[in-house]
Image (cartoon, rainbow, N blue to C red):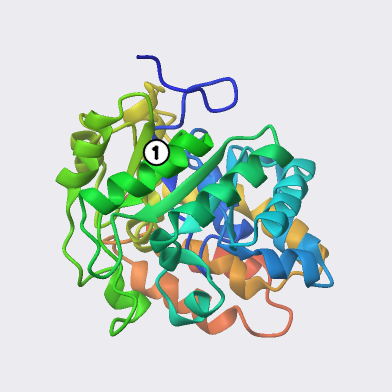
């Protein structure tokens, strides 16, 4: 059975997970210099921030180079989500994703995130409303369950509801979320991973696009998962080691090795930094994507320290990044 198309092409085999305070436009832009194919996700943006905030540009703007890019929304009001879907379409995103996986108390109190897995009817209403407002793919990122839900019966019920509503693409973090007693960080680590459940879901629904997320750290692990599912999403592994993304196009899309080095990639980033500084952005957020680039390389610690100690100083600019680069030998 042919898979649904993502726009006019197959769904990307590799994506960057949405991460609060991480996957901002600077991080996405730098990763795009490493990979043409990786699907980039924004941080979760709530419907309230977009509809009632003073400046939607702050949340929605991105550089054209970031395509393909998905906007992740947090919310549970169908009308509000439809309005935000229309905004995302106007802004030029490639996908709109509904967050049904975040376990934090703050979002639960606003009926956002993983708590929605216990309300499949409401989620399907949201999906239908969003689809009515946009021609873009509307997708779901969720867990395999919450609290005492049955990972087989309840997950299947949830998927069937959304499938009936027209959703064809699901990204599953292969753990349950515990809504009480665990912090968001613990919810990324404590509930056991169950990759086999996600693989069974794909086998049971070959017509759906199923992507897997959670606890995956290497491209070799990604290849293993891609034997059973359609796509793999990585988050913390990329934050800790952004350079991992430099091999995605070659490993998963058959691209030729471009010979890019860490030094060259960072130098390619400098014009962007200069442009954003001229627009009034601060340097400090723009150095964060670079901190893990030289993981395991001689001079990496001095590189990070140079950036961290200097980025907040008045007048700091690309010269600081160039100075930090000089701390790492280029013949590594």
Q: Give me the residue at 53% from left, 21% from top.
A: 9
Residue 283: x %, y % from top left = 66, 72
Q: Is residue 163 above or below residue 42?
A: above
Q: Give me the residue at 46% from left, 42% from top.
A: 162
Residue placed most toward the observer, 265 or 70? 70
Q: Give me the residue at 66% from left, 85% from top.
A: 313
Query: Can you name the residue that lies furthest to the front here?
Result: 121
Q: Give the quarter of the image for residue 281.
A: bottom right
Residue placed most toward the observer, 55 or 282? 55
Residue 206: x %, y % from top left = 30, 25
Left or right: 197 in relation to 305 = left
Please rate how many residues cluster around mark 1, counting C-alpha atoms within 10 Å: few if below 14, some from 14 to 19, many from 20. Answer: many
Q: Is residue 108 above or below residue 258?
A: below
Query: On the image, numbered disc 1 is attached to which residue?
Result: 14
Total residue callouts: 1
Residue placed most toward the observer, 77 or 185? 77
User: Taking the image as drawn, is residue 239 in sight?
Assistant: yes
Q: Is residue 209 above or below residue 274?
A: above
Mark 1 falls on what kind of element? strand
Left or right: 176 in relation to 322 = left
Q: Is residue 186 above or below residue 228?
A: below
Report the quarter where the N terminus lies. Answer: top left
User: Taking the image as drawn, is residue 30 in sight?
Assistant: no
Residue 302: x %, y % from top left = 39, 74
Residue 132: x %, y % from top left = 70, 38
Residue placed most toward the observer, 162 or 169? 162
Left or right: 1 in relation to 319 = left
Q: Give the quarter of the image for residue 200.
A: top left
Q: Give me the residue at 20% from left, 72% from top.
A: 190
């Amino acid at each position: 059975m042919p898979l649904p198309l993502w726009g006019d092409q197959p769904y990307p085999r590799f994506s960057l997970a949405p991460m609060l305070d991480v996957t901002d436009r600077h991080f996405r832009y730098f990763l795009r210099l490493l990979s043409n194919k990786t699907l980039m996700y924004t941080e979760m943006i709530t419907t309230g921030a977009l509809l009632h905030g003073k400046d939607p540009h702050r949340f929605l703007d991105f550089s054209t180079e970031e395509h393909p890019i998905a906007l992740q929304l947090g919310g549970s009001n169908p009308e509000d989500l439809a309005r935000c879907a229309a905004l995302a379409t106007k802004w030029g995103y490639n996908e709109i994703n509904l967050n049904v996986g975040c376990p934090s108390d703050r979002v639960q109190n606003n009926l956002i995130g993983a708590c929605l897995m216990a309300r499949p009817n409401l989620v399907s209403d949201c999906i239908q409303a969003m689809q009515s407002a946009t021609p873009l793919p509307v997708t779901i990122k969720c867990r395999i369950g919450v609290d005492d839900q049955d990972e087989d019966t309840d997950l299947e019920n949830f998927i069937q509801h959304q499938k009936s509503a027209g959703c064809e693409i699901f990204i599953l973090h292969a753990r349950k979320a515990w809504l009480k007693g665990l912090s968001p960080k613990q919810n990324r680590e404590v509930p056991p991973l169950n990759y086999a459940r996600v693989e069974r879901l794909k086998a049971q629904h070959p017509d759906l696009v199923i992507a897997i997320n959670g606890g995956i750290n290497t491209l070799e692990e990604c290849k293993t998962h891609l034997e059973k599912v359609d796509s793999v999403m990585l988050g913390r592994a990329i934050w800790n080691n952004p350079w991992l993304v430099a091999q995605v196009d070659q490993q998963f899309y058959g691209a030729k090795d471009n010979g890019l080095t860490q030094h060259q990639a960072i130098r390619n980033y400098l014009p962007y930094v200069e442009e954003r500084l001229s627009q009034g952005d601060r340097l400090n957020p723009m150095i964060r994507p670079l901190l893990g680039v030289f993981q395991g390389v001689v001079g990496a610690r001095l590189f990070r320290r140079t950036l961290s100690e200097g980025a907040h100083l008045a007048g700091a600019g690309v010269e600081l990044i160039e100075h930090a680069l000089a701390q790492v030998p280029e013949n590594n």
